[in-house]
Amino acid sequence: MTSKVETVLNNICATAQSCGRPPDDIALVAVSKTQPITAIIPVLDQGQRLFGENKIQEAAGKWPTLRAQYSDAKLHLIGPLQSNKVRQAILLFDVIETIDRPKLARAIARISREEGKFCDCYIQINIGREPQKAGVDPDEADAFVTLCRDELKLPVCGLMCIPPAAQDPAPYFRLLGEIARRNGLEKLSMGMSGDYQTAIRCGATSVRVGTAIFGARTAAQ
């Protein structure tokens, strides 16, 4: 029987090939937020090594234990980051995908230098200009990339977004790609369980998939 991880990977491969892209160009980030260690271990045992977590405290309670056994696992922070938790985030995560304001960017730059550890960084774009969502306004993205990459010398590798719900995500994914191209950024973190194949067709280089791997979260989660 094909596992859920294998199904997602097979879908990624088929979608990439259908639009002329090498499947290896797209990374799967398994979103393990709210999942217990017992649910994550089987996914690790199937060879998955990239995982995404939303909350630092939750990740800190799981991943030191998991990494003791799976030392090559890589962890992406895909939830909001408060400035007072930057040091903990830098020490725990390998990639920070949610840089969205100058104060946070400056804190990451300063503490990265102090700790001697620089995580790969993505800038989060509020691609639908939704007031309830975090992220840089698309019209301010170029200036913010310049601040982070050129002034603060952060290792900015790409952009991340969450498109508006219940709308066709493709135009938003394409807009993120346009912002990335004009700023010389190669990586696009976009697409989740419901739209990752659309994201791949629009140029995603990583997709963040939780429900399709771990199942639907309960109300308590």
Image: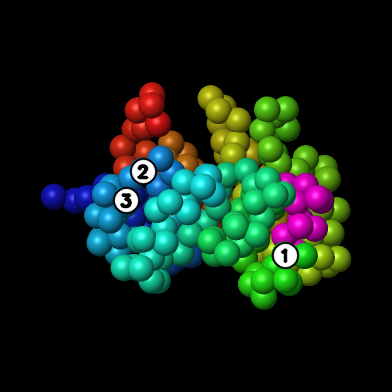
Q: Is residue 77 magenta?
A: no
Give the residue at mark 2. Answer: 35
Q: Is residue 108 magenta?
A: yes
Residue 3 visible to the viewer? yes
Secondary structure beneath disc 3? helix
Q: Three-letter amino acid code at disc 2?
A: Gln
Residue 54 relative to residue 123: left or right: left
Give the residue at mark 1. Answer: 111
In the image, what residue occupies the spot 57% across and 36% down?
Answer: 169
Q: Three-letter amino acid code at disc 3?
A: Ile
Q: Three-letter amino acid code at disc 1?
A: Ile
Residue 142 relative to residue 64: left or right: right
Q: Quadrant of residue 23?
A: bottom left
Vertical side of 143 occupied by 185: above or below: below
Residue 84 percent coordinates (x, y): 70, 49
Give the residue at mark 3. Answer: 37
Question: 47 or 7, which lies in front?
Answer: 47
Magenta-drawn segment = 100-109
Judged by depth in the image, the label closer to the viewer, 1 or 2, is 1
User: Farthest residue toward the bottom?
Assistant: 116
Residue 7 percent coordinates (x, y): 28, 49
